[in-house]
Amino acid sequence: MAFEGLSSKLQEAFRKLRGKGQITEADLRSTMREIRLALLDADVNFTVVRDFVKKVQAKAKGENVLEGLNPGQQIIKIVDDELTEMMGGETTTLKKSNKIPTIIMMAGLQGAGKTTTVGKLAKMLKEDDNARPLMIAADVYRPAAIEQLQQIGKQIDVPVFEEGTEVNPVKIVEDGLKVAKENHNDYVFIDTAGRLQIDEKLMNELKEIKEVAKPTDILLVVDAMTGQNAVNMAEGFNEALDITGVVLTKLDGDTRGGAALSIKAVTGKPILFTGQGEKMDNLDVFHPDRMASRILGMGDVLSLVEKTKKNIDEKKSMELAEKMKENTFNFDDFLDQLQQIQNMGPLKNLMAMIPGMANNPALQNVDMDPKDLDRIKAIIYSMTNEERENPDVLNPSRRRRIAKGSAQPIQSVNRLIKQFNQMKKMMNQISNGNMSGMENMMQQTGMGKGMNKLSSLAMKRMSRKIKKNKRKKNKKKRK
């Protein structure tokens, strides 16, 4: 998970401030030293770290934080604000041309995930804005790049313009733009060539393409795992092309996150999107304020809600709610829920978006391995329709048959049935306004150890709200 190391170190630094009625200048210096070391260890640019610490210290002293109420919380708020500012302050989106097509030129070194990102962006615009994008294959030096883009185009049902590897890339872009105008494509993505490193020939070619295409946006695709090299590379491309924004890929593989924290401050150009995975849906809009909250362990509820809306079928959710009320939740529903949750991304990342859960020690090994889901599927698919719909009939002999049919040990079958019964019980309690079932389950799994008073209070409020709504419905029925 991105920023995992930085997040835990920052929270450790703040833990010493929390609960203190008064904070001395020595306390502040000590905390700032820990923050500085945490940022440097996360591979954040040295100059950026130095400026960041100066700003936080100046604000803490200038606003008389040390003498105010809850000084610890006020310092955390200042750090949160400065982290947000460091990463760009506000969310930046793609520009839209006054007349079609809007042209987006993609640049980057080989291996950064440029071609895959072109497909992800095209798919995102097609789904969210009902756009009709066209992708131009202008990387003639790597034949596999053209083939890859064509395969992506088929996968997301977006046309690809290509003229092979023998035509000059600038000519391909010119011809592709003519086709886009003829077909009234409202977005055009130009997948340019990459290199193993920045060289003069590459830059000259990109400058020619820019001159011909006159792109609305020039997005640089950067591999987050390369750390400070990513920042240096972004500087080089920006000097040559005057890029308009950055897409950070492989953020899920970078536990430090220094590139994300340094790029805006060093280049002055914002991060627009982050990629976390190879699937065409694994692209997120970059929100500096939400990322800052996540780094500080305060969660990211807005992003969690957006992911839920995007990946959870609303109709199925309503049907599930009815089944929960009627206590008819079965193994088919159980499997469907697991698959929908898996589509939202790594479980560990989702839990980190919940306030109070971000650096819970119990979450360090919480995740859903795709192989585990395959094993669960094998067990459920080895059941008869009757057994899936009515798990109460699963006696020892049926369980042995299912274990044999799924090639899984009997212990795995018994464990799955136990987990299913626990989930069914918990969901039934929640649907009836009783949140204690959720709390008990979390305590049993170890996740409850890190739940703070705020999480517990939120659950009780939710429980009261459900009960209140239920009473209102009952009153209406009686009337």
Image: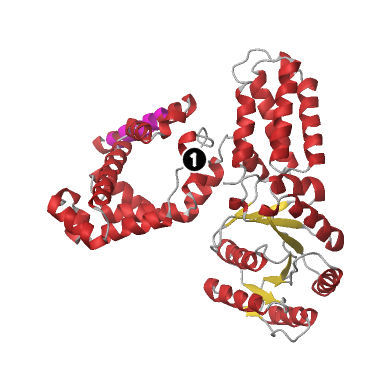
Q: Is residue 221 above or below residue 479?
A: below
The residue beneath circle 1 is: 364
User: Which secondary structure dominates the residues rendered in magenta?
Assistant: helix
Left or right of 319 in this view: 106: right
Percent across and percent down for residue 75 are 69, 25
Q: Is residue 417 above or below residue 80?
A: below
Q: Is residue 17 above or below residue 233?
A: above
Task: Residue 297 in the image: state x and y as whole percent.
Answer: 58, 35
As drawn, the residue found furthest toward the bottom would be 166
Tell me which residue sits at (60%, 77%) in the image: 150
Q: In the figure, is residue 354 to the left or right of 26?
A: left
Where does the magenta region start and end? 460-474
Q: Is residue 467 magenta?
A: yes
Closer-to-camera residue (345/133):
345
- Please provide percent x and percent y for residue 405: 22, 62
- Expressed as whole percent of the image width and height from the top left, the position of residue 440 reads 34, 31
Does 277 appear in magenta? no
Give left or right: position of 271 versus 375: right
